[in-house]
Structures are given as C-alpha cells and as structure tokens.
Image (cartoon, rainbow, N blue to C red):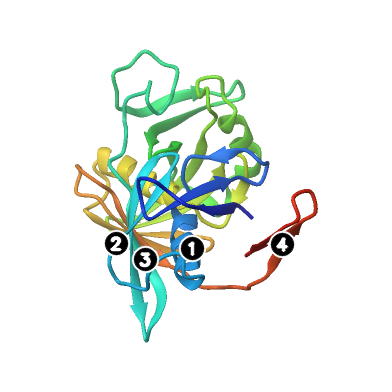
C-alpha cells in the first residue's frame, strides 16, 4: 500500500505527503488524493462541504471536489492540472522540445514505442493490440521504470483501445510495482491517446481495481473522477517518538 500523511499547510487547506511501497516519496497520487480528502473530512481536518478542497502536494496545489451521496463522500472530482509534455520537465533525457510521441525506447531485448507525459510525476505510455492481460508487465515494467533516459524513474502504462470513450489499462508504478490502479497514470493515458487522435474528450478507464472517468479536451487541466470508500480505521503507534497516529 502507498501511504499518505496529512499535514497542515500555509498555502492550501491541507498538505499531503505521499510515499511509495519502497519508501521513496512521490510527487502526487491521483487515487490517493481522493482518499486523503475523505480521510481529512472524516477526522475533521477540513469542514464538511461540497466545495473544492485545495491540497498542497509536491506537484503543486491540487483542487479536489468531494461528491456526496446521502451525506457520505463516495466520489471525488480532481482537477489534476495541465499535463507537461516537454522532455526536460517530464523529465526525460532526450533532445526534443516535445511532445514525445511513440518514441522507440530501446530495452536491449526490444524497442517499445512510448509517449511520455508528466502529470506532476513521470509516465511512459504504450498502446498495444494484444490483450494487456497477457502482457509481461512484471518483466518489462522494471526495465522501463529504471531506464537511463528517465533520470527520476518513470511509471509505465500499457493500453488497449476499446472505443473512443473507453480504454483498458494496466500499470507498473515507480517505486511500487504492479498496482490495481493509478490516477495520474489514467490521466497520462488519456492525454497520450488524445495526442495520437485515438479518443474523444470524455474517457472511461478500465483498470484492474475499477473504473475512472477522465476528461481532457486537449488543453488545460485534466479532470479525474473516481470513487472513494473507507476500508478500515485504526491507530498506529511510533515507539521512537511515542506518537499515536490515526489511520
């Protein structure tokens, strides 16, 4: 599991720090930020409201609008910001002004065409015709994550085009490996598909962990909508600091 820590902020309503499974800190987590806002609401760190909550992250301030059903936050719409397409910003170590579309990434054993996007964190996206369920993501994912052209490593998404408004996606996440879903990855996939002329403005992303709705008209902020639910509650005690934290 990834871990989000709630902190106070001088520039937003709350601040989120996010850590990957390997302990490295990530800039942003699209699914995590929805859960983070639900958690902040549940413990009273933010006021119960259907107005946008501004969250400070390492990728900037992200606006999250809770969606309530019968008084309970069940979904959230997240304004993820505009995608960054310039290689030096992604970052990707190639001499292009951008965007990077279908670049043949040499793995030694084969070349894989990737479209590179930053959604506050780096992504490499490839589109394939064969069913992604049969793709050896556990073998190829680590090679792309740590490829020398990505100085800060990279998330890797493989995609099947099901229709102009529906994509099927699997993800190898930087610092976490195979995961059930990736919010920033879903956004990056839609941007990459849009750049290639493969999708319309509104797209449903089918991930192993469920569905996300992504909207991007080809400019401006990418908007992601997805569900959120409390799975369990507990307390964690740190013996080194004698601090008890709510989870």
Q: Is there CB contact under 8 Å for labels 2 and 4?
A: no
**Which is more foreground, mark 2 or mark 3?**
2
| Mark 2 burial class by Cα count in 10 Å: few <14, some 14-19, many 20+ | some
Give the secondary structure at mark 4. Answer: strand
- Helix or strand or loop: what does disc 3 sit on? strand
Tell me the CA gap for discs 3 and 1: 9 Å
Q: Residue tagged by mark 4?
A: 236
Of marks 4 and 1, the one in the foreground: 4
Q: Earlier in the sequence, mark 3 or mark 1?
A: 1
Residue 35's label in the rendered image is 1
Q: Are marks 3 and 1 in contact (CB under 8 Å)?
A: no
Instruction: Tell me the crowding category of disc 3: few under 14, some 14 to 19, or many 20 or more residues within 10 angstroms, Cα based.
Output: many
Please tell me which of labels 2 and 4 falls first in the chain. 2
Coordinates of residue 142 in the picture (x, y in percent): 63, 35
x and y, in percent, of residue 224 in the image: 34, 57
Q: Does any portion of residue 174 appear in the rendered image?
A: no
Whether residue 102 is situated above or below residue 163 in the rendered picture: above
Residue 216's spot in the image, x, y percent?
A: 24, 50
Q: Which mark is residue 76?
A: 3
Residues at marks 2 and 3, CA–CA distance in whole angstroms: 10 Å
Q: CA distance from mark 4 to mark 1?
A: 18 Å
Question: What number is the disc on residue 52?
Answer: 2
- Whichever of labels 1 and 2 marks the residue nearer the N terminus, that label is 1
């Amino acid at each position: 599991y990834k871990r989000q820590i709630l902190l106070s902020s001088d520039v937003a309503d709350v601040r989120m720090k996010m850590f990957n499974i390997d302990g490295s800190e990530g800039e942003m987590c699209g699914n995590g930020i929805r859960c983070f806002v639900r958690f902040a609401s549940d413990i009273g760190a933010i006021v119960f409201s259907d107005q946008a909550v501004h969250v400070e992250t390492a990728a900037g301030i992200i606006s999250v609008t809770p969606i309530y059903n019968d008084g309970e936050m069940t979904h959230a719409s997240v304004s993820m910001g505009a995608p960054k397409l310039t290689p030096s910003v992604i970052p990707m170590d190639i001499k292009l002004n951008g965007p990077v579309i279908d670049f043949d990434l040499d793995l030694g054993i084969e070349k894989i065409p990737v479209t590179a996007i930053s959604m506050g964190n780096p992504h490499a996206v490839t589109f394939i015709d064969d069913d992604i369920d049969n793709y050896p993501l556990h073998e190829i994912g680590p090679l792309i994550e740590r490829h020398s052209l990505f100085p800060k490593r990279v998330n890797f998404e493989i995609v099947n085009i099901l229709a102009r408004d529906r994509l099927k996606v699997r993800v190898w996440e930087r610092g976490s490996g195979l995961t059930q879903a990736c919010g920033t990855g879903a956004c990056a996939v839609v941007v990459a598909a849009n750049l290639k002329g493969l999708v319309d403005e509104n797209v449903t992303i089918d991930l192993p962990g469920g569905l996300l709705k992504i909207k991007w008209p080809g400019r401006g902020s990418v908007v992601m909508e997805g569900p959120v639910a409390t799975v369990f509650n507990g307390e964690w005690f740190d013996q080194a600091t004698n601090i008890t934290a709510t989870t």
